[in-house]
Image (cartoon, grey):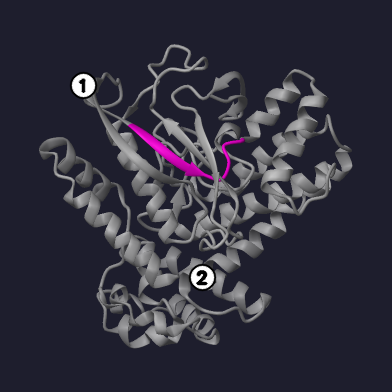
């Protein structure tokens, strides 16, 4: 069970750690394994970490357990993100324990489970913050070298600013992919972000129903600190806290330079993510930016009428999907000035492997979404009738979506 500190809603908390799970094992991906969704090469280290396996030295007053509903939600979120090409931890297994749990924020008693999670790292920004909190430059240096050698071996030994730059780049790419997926993490504290740039430890996550910059996932996020459109700001702020912790081991100016790479990397990542979501090839920075801007403008204008996900389903493959989109259930929405600008920008770009449109996934009028009503319906079937069919059916459809876009 790992010990760490962290800023929670920008308030520093030195009393954190793995309170209901531990790192159970590590393994390496097979050399011939398929590259991960984040584009990294195979052969990387993988963590098997538990969640809900009981109390640890860092549980404080909690019982160390996970509700079955919480486990089901995490499986669904991870599989949806994986299907959309977002770097994420994934569920290796979900095991119901038969215990009854009392929870103040949901009907109780409720069912209990242990989730075993696959992630490339559980080393958090807050792990470094703890070392810096105690003024332990030696511990910071040891942590940097450990994380560098395992997760960012392209960085030279002893190059702490280079290590930070690698984490900045991975975090910028992750944030861009979240935005393109319409994903709202919910709780972007520094103990919920790791050094490999993967989604994990998201609590009250949501996917956008439609374009809404101020949309929040957590009912307790009263100020909108972690709202959809503020996620890049939140991740950058967390990175500055990581940079502050690394000052014990490196020059502040060099660390600042590494942090300054976030903005450009995020914008590049956002352009690339939207190209991927629309299934078209890059045409250069200017044309790609026009497509990004016009896509967001169309999503903003159509609002609830279009929802977020269907636009990317209807127009996947660019002009190769024209007949399909204009004969689909949202054809009437594709008549506006904003759509004309989007169409012009989209049709400039060549379809990327248009043969993918032959998948049955694109013959369906509606895309796979993960909106809260569907999540609650999947859980209701389990809770009320122990009916897991909707859950397994959803996972199968998400796997088909992922395969269609691969």
Please tell me which residue is depicted at 48% across the width and 78% down the height of the picture: 342
Q: Nearer the viewer, residue 399 or 321?
A: 399
The reply, left or right, for residue 88 in relation to residue 238 is left
Compared across the picture, whether 335 is left or right of 121 comes to: left
* In magenta stretch: residue 78: no
Determine the residue located farthest toward the front in the rendered image.
Answer: 31
Foreground residue among 154 and 173: 154
Label 2: few (<14), some (14–19) or many (≥20) C-alpha neighbours in 10 Å = many
Which residue was labeled with disc 2? 276
Going from N to C along the chain, the mark reached first, 2 or 1, is: 1
* Alpha carbon separation for disc pair 2 and 1: 43 Å
Q: In what quadrant of the picture does the C terminus appear? A: bottom left
Q: Which residues are magenta?
A: 114-123
- Left or right of residue 343, residue 17 in this image: right
User: To which residue does mark 1 refer?
Assistant: 109
| Residue 335 visible in the current orientation | no
Q: Quadrant of residue 157?
A: top right
Mark 2 lies on a secondary structure that is: helix
The correct choice, above or below, for 341 with respect to 103 in the image is below
Q: Position of residue 164 (x, y in %)?
A: 75, 44
Q: Badge 1 local density, few (<14 within 10 Å), some, or many (20+)?
A: few
Residue 191's x, y, as percent?
Answer: 58, 32
Instruction: Spot the residue most to the top.
Output: 61
| Percent coordinates x, y for residue 254 in the rendering | 87, 45
Q: Work out whether residue 49 can be spotted.
A: yes
| Residue situated in front as seen by the camera: 304 or 217 | 217
Residue 223: % across, % down: 50, 34
Mainly helix, strand or loop, the magenta region?
A: strand
In the picture, measured across the screen, residue 252 lies left or right of residue 1, that is right
């Amino acid at each position: 069970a790992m010990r760490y500190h962290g800023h929670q809603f920008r308030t520093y908390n030195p009393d954190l750690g793995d309170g209901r799970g531990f790192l159970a094992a590590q393994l390496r991906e097979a050399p011939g394994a398929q590259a991960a969704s984040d584009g990294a090469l195979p052969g990387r280290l993988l963590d098997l970490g538990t969640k809900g396996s009981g109390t640890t030295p860092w549980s404080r007053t909690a019982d160390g357990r996970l509700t079955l509903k919480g486990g089901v939600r995490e499986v669904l979120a991870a599989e949806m993100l994986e299907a959309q090409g977002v770097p994420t931890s994934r569920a290796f297994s979900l095991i119901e324990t038969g215990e009854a749990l009392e929870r103040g924020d949901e009907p109780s008693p409720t069912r209990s489970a242990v989730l075993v999670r696959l992630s490339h790292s559980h080393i958090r920004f807050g792990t470094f913050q703890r070392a810096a909190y105690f003024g332990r430059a030696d511990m910071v240096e040891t942590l940097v070298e450990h994380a560098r050698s395992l997760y960012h071996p392209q960085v030279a030994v002893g190059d702490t600013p280079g290590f930070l730059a690698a984490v900045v780049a991975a975090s910028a790419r992750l944030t861009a992919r979240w935005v393109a997926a319409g994903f709202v993490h919910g709780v972007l504290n520094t103990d919920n972000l790791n050094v490999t740039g993967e989604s994990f430890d998201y609590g009250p996550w949501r996917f956008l129903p439609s374009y809404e910059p101020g949309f929040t996932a957590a009912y307790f996020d009263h100020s909108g600190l972690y709202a959809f459109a503020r996620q890049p700001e939140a991740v950058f702020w967390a990175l500055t806290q990581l940079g502050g912790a690394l000052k014990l081991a490196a020059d502040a100016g060099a660390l600042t330079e590494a942090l300054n790479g976030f903005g450009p990397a995020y914008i590049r990542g956002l352009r690339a993510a939207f190209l991927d979501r629309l299934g078209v090839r890059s045409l250069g920075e200017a044309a790609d930016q026009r497509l990004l801007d016009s896509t967001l403008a169309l999503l903003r204008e159509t609002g609830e009428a279009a929802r977020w996900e269907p636009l990317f389903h209807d127009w996947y493959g660019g002009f190769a999907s024209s007949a399909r989109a204009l004969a689909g259930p949202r054809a009437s929405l594709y008549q506006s000035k904003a759509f004309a600008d989007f169409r012009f920008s989209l049709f400039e770009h060549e379809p990327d492997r248009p043969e993918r449109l032959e998948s049955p996934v694109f013959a369906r009028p509606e895309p796979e979404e993960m909106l809260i009503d569907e999540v609650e319906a999947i859980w209701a079937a389990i809770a009320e009738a122990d009916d897991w069919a909707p859950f397994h059916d959803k996972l199968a459809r998400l796997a088909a979506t992922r395969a269609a876009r691969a």
